[in-house]
Image (cartoon, helix red, strand yellow):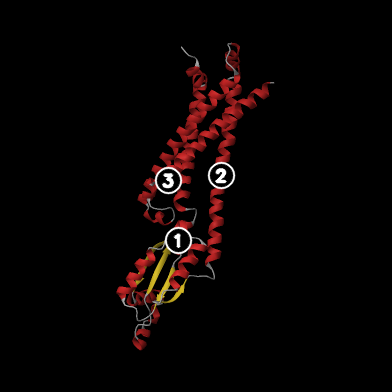
Amino acid sequence: MSESPPLWWIDWRLSRGSLVREAIGRFLFFCLLGSVLLSLLLSGGVSRFLSERYAITAVLRAEVPSAEAEGLARKITDLPPVRSAVYRDPEAAWKEFLLAFPGLGPLRGIAGNPMPGYIEIRIRHDRLTGADVDFVASTIRSVSHIEQVLAGEGWYPRLLRAGRIVSWLCWGIFGAFLAGFFVVARLQERARAIALAGDFAFLAERGVFASRLAVLRAAAAGVSGFLLAAAGTAAGGGALFLLLREFSYLEGVIGPPSDLLLPRTVVAVFLFSCGAALISAAVSLLGWRAARSGRK
């Protein structure tokens, strides 16, 4: 029988108990880290939260018929950065005004309905940038039916800047947890390599090259890391899916549960699992090298 298969899973054969404990711990860690990763991917940090609260208001001229205003709203929706464009007729605008200022109802009796119709424009969370907002605002300003465009030019750049900082902070925390996994996994690999030093020496005396053993152990660690990351992220994604379905208000912060099944999300999970495989293989090699250096 070829000795390659036993060498491929040599750690499992020699130290099954510690390997199982480490695998369980890493699976649980990837459940947590995977759910955080998916939340960040769906939400764009805080971009989705901001996109639900920021809107461009296009105030229409008084003589614009409702049919033309609705057609204009549909055309605005076709702009790439736009998520939705909803027309509010003067009557709906008046009711919204009374909700905000309930004591001003008598104004209508004096001069009729003073509120014009308008179109409320929301930007896609992944296109909520200063350039895209300026593009939409400048495009609709050139439309003759529009009297005024209210885009919050005085404050929205600061809002977007703050949003980017928070998003970077979120990704930074995610990266810190990933770095922590690297450090802990390296220490675990080093400790196991030291514990199994006698067994490895026994194999070396029988013609097994240390370089070959290190490569096979790293390859096995990479496969294990990929499977654990994929399984953990899938489990974390399943928990996140149930959470979003149970608490629908979280969709405004994270996103709809259906986005978890999009091809780009699946690709992101695959790439994350590949990264976990590379980290696992690297820490296996580093732990092996540190253990051998410590014996000399």
Which label sits on residue 192? Answer: none
Q: Amino acid at mark 1?
A: Ser
Taking depth in this image into account, of 150 and 32 the one nearest to the observer is 150
- At a point 43% along the width and 42% down the height, the residue shown is 236
Which numbered disc covers residue 51?
A: 1
Quadrant where the C terminus is found in the figure? top right
Left or right of 38, for residue 181 = right
Look at the image and tell me whether residue 295 can be seen: yes
Residue 265 is labelled as 3
The quadrant in which residue 74 appears is bottom left
Question: Where does residue 191 sit, x and y in percent of width and height?
Answer: 60, 26
Would you say the residues marked 2 and 3 are in contact, meaning their CB atoms lie under 8 Å apart? no
- The three-letter code of the residue at mark 2 reads Gly
Q: Is residue 237 above or below residue 228?
A: below
Q: Give residue 175's mark.
A: 2
Mark 2 vs 3, N-terminal side: 2
SS for tag 3?
helix
Question: Given contact means CB atoms under 8 Å apart, are the residues at marks 3 and 1 in contact?
Answer: no
